[in-house]
Image (cartoon, grey):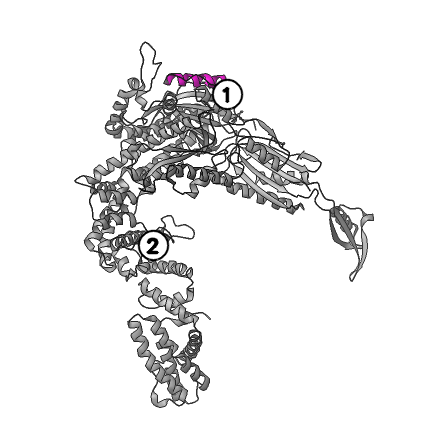
Amino acid sequence: MPDLLIELFSEEIPARMQAQAAEDLKKRMTDGLVEAGLTYAGAAAFSTPRRLTLAIDGLLDHSPTVREERKGPKVGAPEKAIEGFLRGAGLTMEQLEERETPKGNVYFATIEKPGRPAAEIIAEVLDTTIRNFPWPKSMRWGAGTLRWVRPLQSILCILSKDEGTEVVPFEIEGIKAGDTTKGHRFMAPAELTVRSFEDYATQLKRAFVVLNAEERAEAIWQDATNQAFALGLEVVEDKGLLREVAGLVEWPVVLLGAIDEEFLELPPEVLQTSMKEHQKFFSVKNPQTGRIERFVTVANRETADTGATILAGNQKVLSARLADAKFFWENDLRTAKSEVGMSAWVQNLGNVTFHNKLGTQAARIDRIAALAREIAPVVGADADLAEQAARVAKADLSSEMVYEFPELQGLMGRYYAEAAGLPQEVANACELHYSPLGPSDDVPSEPVSVAVALADKIDTLTGFWAIDEKPTGSKDPYALRRAALGVTRLVLENNARVGLKEIFAKGFDGADADNLLSFFHDRLKVFLRDQGIRHDVIDACIAMDGNDDLTLLVKRARALEDFMKSEDGENLLQGFKRANNILTQAEDKDGVEYSFGADEKFLEDDSEKALFAALAASEGAISSAIEAEDFAAAMGGMAALRAPVDAFFEAVQVNSDNQIVRRNRLNLLSQIRKVCTQVADLTKIEG
Amino acid sequence: MTNIAAPRSFQEIILRLQTYWASKGCAIMQPYDMEVGAGTFHPATTLRSLGSNAWAAAYVQPSRRPTDGRYGENPNRLQHYYQYQVLIKPSPPDLQELYLGSLQAIGVDMELHDIRFVEDDWESPTLGAWGLGWEVWCDGMEVSQFTYFQQVGGHDCHPVSGELTYGLERLAMYVLGVDHVMDMPFNDPQSPIPLKYGDVFKQTEEEYARWNFDVANTEVLLRHFEEAEAECAAILAQEHMDPKTGKRIIMAHPAYDQCIKASHIFNLLDARGVISVTERQAYIGRVRALAKQCADAFVLTEAGGFKGENAA
């Protein structure tokens, strides 16, 4: 069975798109081939900056012959109907078969679709694949209409069989498939004629092209770490950068370079960011000092001077970049250490609009500072420190360094606050008040940072709520869901006891606090569902008072979740539901509310008396447990009701003919409801 | 690939690029005689990339970016600098090779340097234009922008033009091994009167930086902006038929001049710091609207591929 090799050779494909494109090529081609009846044994796809390659082995030589039987009109049907059927089937009258059926004699046609040669099918599938390729962005070039990620230059498409290799006849927009490719753009630009995949991979390697992206990445990493190790240094791992760099070269050559002494005092994050963002360099660290002292760059070729010119060039570019960074750093430090200090930057933020309906960044900082003061005592922070921290936390947005590298916001604030001699908690808050940024990001625990982080996020949320810019569907341009989750995690993980509505009221004027709280509850449900807590359990707890105290709410929900998982819990829930149903029906029917409590003297059955006693005992126990926020104990109190409730329903008919007894029993049920719903609104629990 | 002797001056690099692209069949045009922010604004690029007519041009374009002024002190930031621009329509299949040839022509030895095409999609919000391509790296330094135009002035490009833009000072500094732009030899250092870049431009950088940042009369500029906008619309509102000559004369180029003018005034206002973040978008939108109207007009002219009122 033949093997198929396809290479789509183009001008440089963006690194970030290569791996997905190789996968798409494989999927679309193999799906198309299989659909046309060409099965295969195995397929593998590869990518380099200039080529997408697909190797399929053990492909069928021909698609199999397919027989299809089609039922036609009755014998003796109007001639037009029979003619139509023949046309559709592509047969003549003599080729039809008459068969008896329960509805009389009917014409049957057997249509045979002969198998087609693999090459013909490949050409069709390849044409469709190229024309419909799912590039994230594609373009036209020259005078043509074909779209590809960058101009497509040549196509190699061969079938290798035992008897030899044949080119699949294929042409698209003037590009004719052949059996040739090219090696490295500079090191081996000559044309190569290829017979099979093995031959292709071998020849490419001789022509300075490593076909497999993972092999390139592996080689880069190996060589980089070896070179660093030889100097007693280590390369700072960065998988994303490694993938990207492997997509920028066909023949990786690792070069280790030095950073000018004068830049080594820059914060390591600045060095790292500058080198990565602008130059795609890896940072090389001295494990003794933690300082970044060198860099690794990956060239795409070998040279006679073993990379000396390339390295010198790269070093020069880096020095120019770092000279900028150093210039910013020194200017910023000078400002931070000056008499006015970081407040000069805050003043500048008066000219920066945060949102046209929410005022400037400076106005926002005033609000956050006031709010941080309010929140401080609740999270155990010193109010003065919290306010001070809030006032400088965003100052670095005006610094030159953050203007150049926005991703360093917060971190630079910490450096500058330290340089300005501000208290350590304040400096920490500059960096940490942005946290947590995602569901897995660390949550700050230092009270001052927590207070500012909460104030920052709540100002944002109440602000956008006040101007009615809430997230809708998948649109959340101001990342408000993330902010709400951030507040939730800050509160929960610090065990903070905060009444959110009270805090919302101190945030931006005019936010609908109830609506915002229900947004929080929705986010909380998603968050807790991921932790295995059922949504109806959360609903049952949200329905209780104090639901803007998330710590309390979650404590209650966890206890209820555990209780509902126990046998007692499940049975008590059934008993509760039964009691509630009977009671609700009776109340609807009678138009009264049975909330007086049962009268001991009308209790007849022993089970009634036992339930009455149990309710009296647990009511006190549960309410004092709830008072103490000991939800496990409260659940225990409910568990104690399970047996008496079960026994009661076993022995007693609530709707007795004696109206006094009936009323008394309904009042008893009402007590069950009252006692149980102290803990959570069990009517919301499903099942 | 043969090694070519290293150039000795800024002007030699420019002359070699001119000779190289002339030898590849480009019409060597002269700079456009108006203030522009980049070589792309030259009508030889913006307008000629529209329509179906083939085109091949190369030229130096002095470019002005008022906000980049640093009083001549920054090693490579200037408010006035030069771009070298090549535009070929339709883009030839060997444009990358042609480009690499131009680097060799200015003395970049392909055997010793690491040249890379790194994804960088180009967009000009003021021209309503975008394309896909790369920034070209030489040993980690960006030396050119390489773009296949997909849309200009809101029009799809058919055929597609290939555009190359070289930042001449930066490229030359690299090739000549100079660290500060003002130290770069402008003419041959062996000349009887050797001149450095700084001899030519240090003082003007200072003068313009001061004017751009602190002195330019913003009221006058704001008025000029409005006037240019109005004039552009007025030009394009004219009948296609010229009553005097009886010919069909659509004044796409004069209208486009007003668009260029508005764009540069906007850049000056920006440097003066009188445009707020929100207003910025609005101004860019107004310039884009002009560019679009000019493009609409140009494709109705002969140079824009118009084949006559009755042609299909």
> Observer-nearest residue: B224 or A140?
A140
Q: Measure the alpha-carbon separation of dots 2 and 1.
A: 59 Å
What residue is pinned by disc 2? A486
Q: Do labels 2 and 1 share a chain?
A: no
Q: Residues within 10 Å of mark 2 (few under 14, many from 20)?
A: many
What residue is pinned by disc 1? B1
Q: Give the range drawn in magenta.
A: B10-29
- Is residue B17 on the magenta stretch? yes
Q: Is mark 2 on a helix, strand or loop?
A: helix
Residue most toward the right? A94
Q: Residue at x 26, y 44 (%)?
A: A413
Q: Which residue is drawn at 41% across and 86% down?
A: A607
Which of the 4 quarters of the picture holds residue A107?
A: bottom right
Q: Give percent across and percent down for residue A58.
A: 66, 43
Q: Is residue B274 visible?
A: no
Q: Name the amino acid, label 1.
A: Met
Q: In the displayed structure, would residue B98 be above or below residue A67? A: above
Q: What element carries label 1?
A: loop
Disc 2 or disc 1, which is closer to the eye?
1
